[in-house]
Image (cartoon, rainbow, N blue to C red):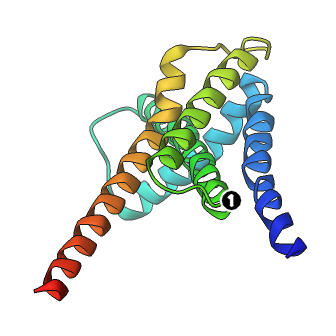
Amino acid sequence: MKRQYSKKYLVWLFPAVVAGMIFLFSSQHAEESSHLSNIFVQILLQVREKLGVYPQVTDVSLLHLFSTLVRKGAHVTEYIILCISFLTAFWVSGIRGKGRNIASFVLTFGYACTDEFHQLFVPGRAGRFTDVLIDSSGALVLSLIVVLVMHSRTMRGKRVRRRKSK
């Protein structure tokens, strides 16, 4: 019984670790962060070249576009993982239903706000509300998918119960 009690609290390490990772990534100077993104961009450009795909844009503009997409995509992915970690922690803790989804999104959105505030103090970075919206957009989409899945399961359960009662 004691072991089950501790699992409910240990699972909260998952969101704490994810939040810590996001904090570490956000603590990188702008140059470090851009360098990391540009490594992925260079890989994408090499794949593009190997596949023979040559869009009608210069490599400089393509590099900038890919760099932006990689950076923003990484942020969205980080916050999707954070939202999943909150959903999991609430689930294991016994919290179910819409409240779990709302709380997971609100906590993720709140962390995105504090992360952007933190970036105000990192050289070369800026805290922008538009970045909060981009960061938490993945969490919002995830939360909506979870709500739709829960709703479809509820409706399916109601249909099965109606069939059995007839």
* Quarter where residue 148 is shown: bottom left
Which residue lies under the disc numbered 1? 93
| x and y, in percent, of residue 145 in the image | 36, 54
Is residue 86 placed above or below 128 in the rendered structure?
A: below
Vertical position of residue 119 compared to residue 145: above or below: above
Q: From what the image shows, is residue 64 above or below residue 3? A: above
Rendered residue at 32%/33% (across/down): 57
Residue 56 placement: quadrant = top left
> Is 102 situated left or right of 94 in this image?
left
Q: Which residue is drawn at 48% across and 40% down?
A: 102
The image shows residue 41 at horizontal and vertical percentages of 55, 45
Foreground pick, 40 / 81: 81
* Residue at image coords 67%, 56%: 89
Quick one: 70 or 150, which is closer to the camera? 150
Where is residue 22, by image quadrant?
A: top right
Q: In front here: 148 or 127?
A: 148
* Label 1: few (<14), some (14–19) or many (≥20) C-alpha neighbours in 10 Å: some
